[in-house]
Image: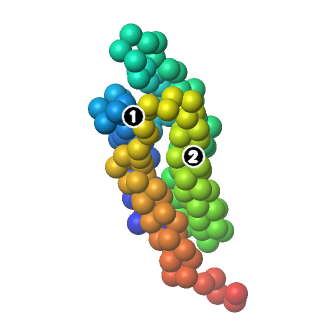
Amino acid sequence: MVRTLIFTALAIFCFALPFFTVSCQGQSVSSVRGIDLVIGHDVPSSLQSGPAQHIAPNIWAAAALILAIVALLVIAFWQREPAAIPWITGLTAAAVLALLAVLLSVRDALSEHAVLTIRAAYGYYLTILFMAAGTVSSLFSRSAAPRQPGA
């Protein structure tokens, strides 16, 4: 269960890293961190004098962060309870699915600006990797959990 705790904590930390880079005609315009997606972010216009476009808070990024935090709390406080393992697995797996939905929703949000290119950055991939590793390690915790006498 300690591995799952570490992977989940690392995934939460990765929200401070760049999730996406926004570029215009090959020139980097902005970098969007995971936390920026949760609280909203202004992306500079593709035109030099144009107004910045505000990206509203992304429900999928917020859901992924909330699920990861709840999973971390469940691991921290109920790790000795065998009944917690399905909850941990479900929470981390749901966070992975929410993170995958982030990519699609961010691309849709800026799709009307044909000159802007959105690319996933290393923070996004690391977050998915650590959450998926947390899910897998929680599955292995299930098989390694000691059985109750008489069960």
- Quadrant of the rendered image containing residue 58: top right
Q: Which residue is mark 2?
A: 104
Q: 125 or 147, which is in the foreground?
A: 125
Q: Which residue is mark 1?
A: 22
- Residue at image coords 52%, 21%: 54
Judge whether residue 66 can be spotted in this image. no
Q: CA distance from mark 1 to mark 2?
A: 14 Å
First in sequence: mark 1 or mark 2? 1
Look at the image and name its color scheme. Answer: rainbow
Q: Label for residue 103?
A: none
Q: How many numbered markers are drawn?
A: 2
Direction from residue 11 to residue 84 in the image, left or right: right
Crowding near the residue tagged with mark 2, few <14, some 14–19, many ≥20 C-alpha atoms within 10 Å: few
- Residue at image coords 44%, 32%: 116
Give the percent coordinates (x, y) of residue 112.
56, 30
Q: What quarter of the picture does the C terminus occupy?
A: bottom right
Amino acid type, residue under disc 1 in the picture: Val
Direction from residue 148 to residue 146 in the image, left or right: left
Give the percent coordinates (x, y) of residue 24.
37, 31
Give the percent coordinates (x, y) of residue 31.
36, 33
* 103, above or below 144, in the image: above
- Quadrant of the rendered image containing residue 94: bottom right
Give the percent coordinates (x, y) of residue 59.
62, 37
SS of the residue under disc 2: helix
